[in-house]
Amino acid sequence: MAVFKPENVEDFYEIGEVLGSGHFAQVRKVHERATGTYWAGKFLKIRKNTCSRLGLDRTRLEEEVDILHTIQHPNIVTLKDVFESRAEVVLVLELVTGGELFDFIAEKENLLESEAIEFMEQILKGLGFMHSKNIAHFDLKPENIMLSDRVAPHPNIKLIDFGLAHRFQQGDEYRSSSGTPQYIAPEVITSEPLSTAADMWSIGVITFILLSGLSPFQGDTDDETLRNIIIMNYEFAAQYFSMTSSMAKDFIQKLLVKDPNERMTAEECLLHPWIKPI
Ligand SMILES: Cc1ccc2c(c1)c1c3c(c(C)cc1n2CCCN)C(=O)NC3=O
């Protein structure tokens, strides 16, 4: 069992404003007393015992910490410290101040393909690094793609939130039904064994939205969305894609492939002509 720092996090960090919150987790800005540096504190409620349904499973959290310790990359948020007291664990993470990628895009009239490519290339570099270590994110969505500095001419992308991530061991078979309907791959819905290819499906969905503002499979209900994914019900509606290059559509089509083994990998994406023109 991993041991996290038993000290009280408030002895080292002043706890600030809430940045975001979920079921059993809250993210707050924290101020490091010794250096004056700001970080993001992810406060997680841990189950007191295996019978309890309240809080997160500690094993799940240990996997998130192990994964974050393993992946140090310019496009992935870094983990600085982990504290534990009573039924709470606090991850001290790199603070990413540029907001979510999609908020950045929403504020622009429209995104040039060249700008979309620049963002996609950084996302793929971070993802390719993770996948090279047999780690899948399993919750790739616009909310988990953030910018380190939105005013920079070329903002730096940071992948965040590894709460559903998994490191594959040799011969490991892993199934999960978690994730956000709009972005999950068909094999997640049909409970087949998963791989890093499930992340590549999500990249296809994110690219589709980046270029059109539309979510390819979204229905009026989650059930309808899941049905659209299973039957591959999506199209490049002329009204939204008339200005989109055929290379960009080809890139998306090579990711929204039902068979995970036939989907482009992150490395293959980085060599695709849309990303790396010949
Ligand atoms: C300035 C700001 C605002 C909201 C933030 C964050 C930073 C943030 C951060 C992280 C996570 C997991 C969630 C976060 N959230 C919650 C929303 C993320 N989509 C994180 O790991 N570093 C952050 O800065």
Image (cartoon, grey):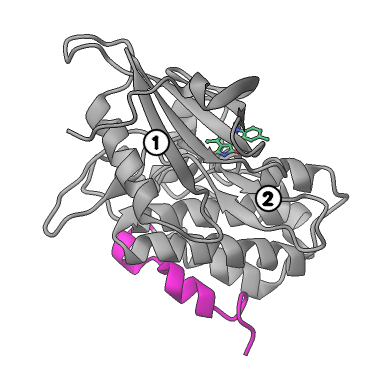
- Residue 4, located in which quarter of the rendered image? top left
Q: Secondary structure at mark 1?
A: loop
Closer to the camera, 214 or 35? 35
Quadrant of the displayed image that contains ligand 1: top right
What range of the chain is rendered magenta? Answer: 258-278
Q: Is residue 43 in sight in this rendering?
A: yes
The residue under the point 22% across, 35% down is: 2
**Labels 1 and 2 touching (C-beta < 8 A):** no
Residue at the extreme bottom of the image, as rendered: 278
| Residue receiving disc 1 | 163
Residue at the extreme right of the image, as rendered: 109
Closer to the camera, 133 or 230? 133
Would you say 107 lies left or right of 226 here?
A: right
Q: Label 2 amino acid?
A: Ser
Where is 29 relative to 256, above or below?
above
- Residue 1, located in which quarter of the rendered image? top left
Q: Which of marks 2 and 1 precedes in the sequence?
A: 2
| Label 2: few (<14), some (14–19) or many (≥20) C-alpha neighbours in 10 Å | many
Residue 188, how many percent across, how many down?
Answer: 32, 42
Q: Distance between the Cα atoms at labels 1 and 2?
A: 20 Å
Would you say 146 lies left or right of 205 here?
A: right
Q: Is residue 235 in sight in this rendering?
A: no
| Label 1: few (<14), some (14–19) or many (≥20) C-alpha neighbours in 10 Å | some
Would you say 212 lies left or right of 252 here?
A: right
Residue 260, how many percent across, how many down?
Answer: 32, 60
Where is 272 relative to 2, above or below?
below
Would you say 178 lies left or right of 174 here?
A: right
Where is 249 relative to 216, above or below?
below
